[in-house]
Amino acid sequence: MGAGELPPGQRLTKGWPVAHYGPVPKFRPDRWNLQVFGATATGAQYSWTFEEVSALAGITIETDMHCASGPTSTGHEFFGVPAATLLELAPPAPRVTHVMAWAEYGYSANLRLSDFDSARTLLATHHNGEQLTAEHGFPLRLVVPHLYGYKGPKWLRAIEYMTQDRRGFWEERGYHNIGDPWTEQRHSYQEE
């Protein structure tokens, strides 16, 4: 994985293509919150307003974005809250192995806890110095740079802690359960 190197089977695309399933949701700040629920260490459910999420300490990462259908766009700079911060504020129970990232309209993506806890996994609010656009996930987008894009839902609304794995939206429709672009984990038939 050298600088400028593309994962196998990927092709460079210009710009940052918009890709999603369903309509773009309208942001309603008075109704919006981010929740953490499921197997939390305390058994409690946690919730933050957009203002509270925005007030959390953020970091910037630079990354490429890889789509499982082949395009890769390069040179992205994301700013937001590290996923590890959420794990500190709302600790998972010791037996948690996976999370489900929930987005608007019931869209979901499952991740191993270790992928969610990666130092580069981010709850992004900004892209290239500007607030995310609605089409690219405003107000909050999960960015998991080391996995295909379908593992990082736009319009993030909740994280569910799980003690066993359960497939998300695209994983139920034949996409790989892990989604590592460097080993071309695109489809469920490739799973061991």
Image (cartoon, helix red, strand yellow):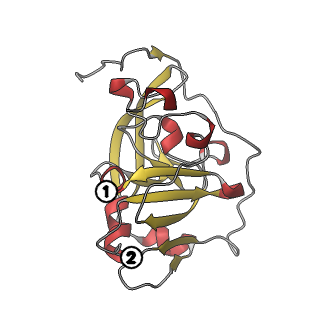
Q: Is residue 192 visible?
A: yes
Is 64 on the left or on the right of 37, as rendered?
A: left
Pinpoint residue 185: horizontal percent, then vertical percent.
Answer: 42, 28
Q: Quadrant of the N terminus?
A: top left
Pinpoint residue 190: horizontal percent, then vertical percent.
Answer: 44, 26
Is 54 on the left or on the right of 120, as rendered?
A: right
Please state which amino acid type lies under the numbered disc 1: Asp
* Numbered label attached to residue 117: 1
Residue at position x 40%, y 45% in the image: 144
Instruction: Write down the residue under mark 2.
Output: 90
- Which callout, 2 or 1, points at the residue further toward the start of the chain? 2
Is 173 on the left or on the right of 39, as rendered?
A: right
* Numbered label attached to residue 96: none
Q: Quadrant of residue 59?
A: bottom left
Q: Is residue 107 above or below residue 89?
A: above
Residue at position x 35%, y 72% in the image: 92
Is 122 on the left or on the right of 52, as rendered?
A: left
